[in-house]
Amino acid sequence: MNKTIRNTTLTIALVSIAAGAACIAQPARAQSASKSISRAVALPPLPLGLSVPDRLPRAIRDPQLLTAWIELYNHTEPIALWDGRTLTGRDLAQFVLDNDIPVVWDTNGVCGASSCSVLTCTDAGCTYADQSAGVDPLYIRPTLQGDSLGTLNALAHEIFHRTQPFGAVADTKFEEYWAYRVGNAIAPKTWPVFDGYDPLVSGWLFLWLANNHMGAYYPLADYPPIVEQFLASAE
């Protein structure tokens, strides 16, 4: 989920889920999870079959969050996106590694009861860069501590937002749909339900939110400009 701040003469806080430009990076070399890793964070026992990259994210200091990142790195099955491209969990994990994005528990309540990143929007566009201290953290809600599946789902969801797949723009219903869909493709949950909804039909997006009880996203625009242009050209 995103916390969006609009910088004009007024500052408006809007809770939404953060998006991320799909920068597909080359995966790091991997080694067996059984090998010892020299780092400050002590890893808990990992599931059998996981590969651990030689280079781990310095900005993830919590063992459970680091384990979720390693699990994400091991998700290599392609996820088909709206435009025919594909994305993997490894792509998302690599994005965090390459951009040195801190991933932390939201112990200060930045996101309320959700996970999020703080997206700052001005007339020039939207960014996740903290204007005073560099890269803003990705916040995971503390109630997921001890819930490995929920943490992995939230991590995939939020990193997808951070890649800004639709460019430097504000959040939309369409982006939220795909952030949830990517999260559930990597760490399946029974909610939300996706079957029977075509996200390229505006009315279906609203029904998807309504039927999954996600009214907080009603104020968002339906589509980012790049998707609006695509829909207009297809008419």
Image (cartoon, helix red, strand yellow):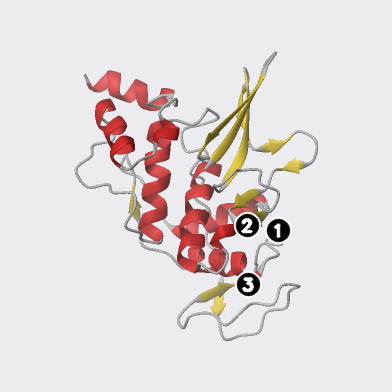
In the rendered image, is residue 87 in sight? Answer: no
Residue 134 locus on image (x, y percent): 76, 41
- The residues bearing labels 3 and 2 have C-alpha atoms spaced at a distance of 12 Å
In the image, farthest residue toward the right? 132
> Which residue is at the front of the view, 118 or 134?
118
Give whichever of discs 3 and 2 has the lower sequence position: 3
Q: Residue at x 44, y 30 (%)?
A: 172
**Mark 1 vs 3: CB contact within 8 A:** no
Q: Mark 3 is on which residue type?
A: Asp
Q: Which mark is residue 59?
A: 1
Residue 8 locus on image (x, y percent): 67, 16
Q: Residue at x 28, y 26 (%)?
A: 202
> Which residue is at the front of the view, 87 or 115?
115
Q: In the figure, is residue 152 to the left or right of 45?
A: left
Local crowd at mark 2 within 10 Å, few (<14), some, or many (≥20)?
many
* Element marked by disc 2: helix
Residue located beneath label 2 in the image: 97
Residue 131 locus on image (x, y percent): 76, 33
Q: Which mark is residue 54?
A: 3
> Which residue is at the front of the view, 172 or 58?
172
Q: Residue at x 27, y 33 (%)?
A: 207
Local crowd at mark 1 within 10 Å, few (<14), some, or many (≥20)?
some
| Residue 21 drawn above or below residue 185 | above
The number of callouts visible is 3
**Mark 3 vs 2: CB contact within 8 A:** no
* Element marked by disc 1: loop
Q: Mark 2 is on which residue type?
A: Leu
| Location of residue 162 by image quarter | top right
| Residue 72 drawn above or below residue 128 | below
